[in-house]
Image (spheres, helix red, strand yellow):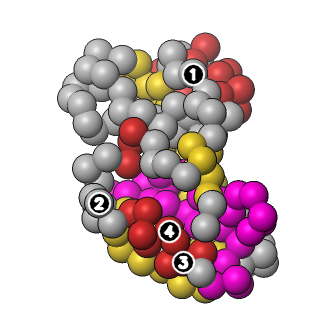
Amino acid sequence: MTYRIIGLPKDRFAPFFAMDAQELEKNGMRRVMATSRPGYPCRVSLQDAEPGESLILANFVSHDVAGPYRSAYAIYVRENAAETEPHVDRLPPVFAGRTLSLRGFDREGMLVRARLAGPGEIEKAIGALFEDPAIAGIHAHNAAYGCFAARIERHGEMQ
């Protein structure tokens, strides 16, 4: 089973870094400074921010479907984040040490199966979910806080 994990595109968030606090607030966002590592997982770079880094805390629609599983929640984006290359058959740094909720959706956006996976269990859980041919993609969320972490797609022959 081959999979890839992708970060979000930086250009989607770049305009927010030019906004002042009032503009951000009007748009439901805030600028924050990382105070610890880990603790501020960037959805573009798929890395934790370093203490002192500027981030935007924004609401993000991670599952944009016209159905009951449409989902939106808060995410962090580092101001100086570089887009990451897809992580093919390997986990991104931001998954290290975290327990994830892995939600397998079909092509219509309906939830088929889900798993909780702790550190050291994530790749096995991804493989188990993708054994079900009905699962088109997996959404990873941080289990404790519920934030969207990344999308996991089938890669190669199994697409």
N-terminal label among 3 and 2: 2
Q: How many marks?
A: 4
Asked if the magenta segment contains residue 145, the reply would be yes
Return the residue at label 1.
82
* Mark pair 4, 2: CA separation: 12 Å
Q: Which residue is depicted at the point 26% across and 20% down?
A: 51
- Local SS, label 4: helix
- Nearest to the observer: residue 74 or residue 26: 74
Q: Position of residue 53 (x, y in %)?
A: 36, 17
* Mark pair 3, 1: CA separation: 30 Å
Q: Position of residue 54 (x, y in %)?
A: 40, 19
Dot 4 and dot 2 residues touching (CB under 8 Å): no
- What's the amino acid at mark 4? Ile
Return the residue at label 3.
129
Dot 4 and dot 3 residues touching (CB under 8 Å): yes
Return the residue at label 2.
120
Mark 4, Cα crowd under 10 Å, few <14 / some 14-19 / many 20+, is many
Nearer the observer: mark 2 or 1; the answer is 2
Mark 2, Cα crowd under 10 Å, few <14 / some 14-19 / many 20+, is few
Determine which of the numbered discs, if any, sits on residue 116 in the image.
Answer: none
- What's the amino acid at mark 1? Ala
In the rendered view, tell whether residue 143 sits above or below residue 19. below
In the rendered view, tell whether residue 22 sits above or below residue 60. above
- Local SS, label 3: helix
Q: Quadrant of residue 139?
A: bottom right
Whether residue 121 is visible to the viewer of this picture, yes or no, is yes
Q: Position of residue 48 (x, y in %)?
A: 36, 33
Nearer the observer: mark 4 or 1; the answer is 4
* Mark pair 3, 2: CA separation: 16 Å
Return the residue at label 4.
126
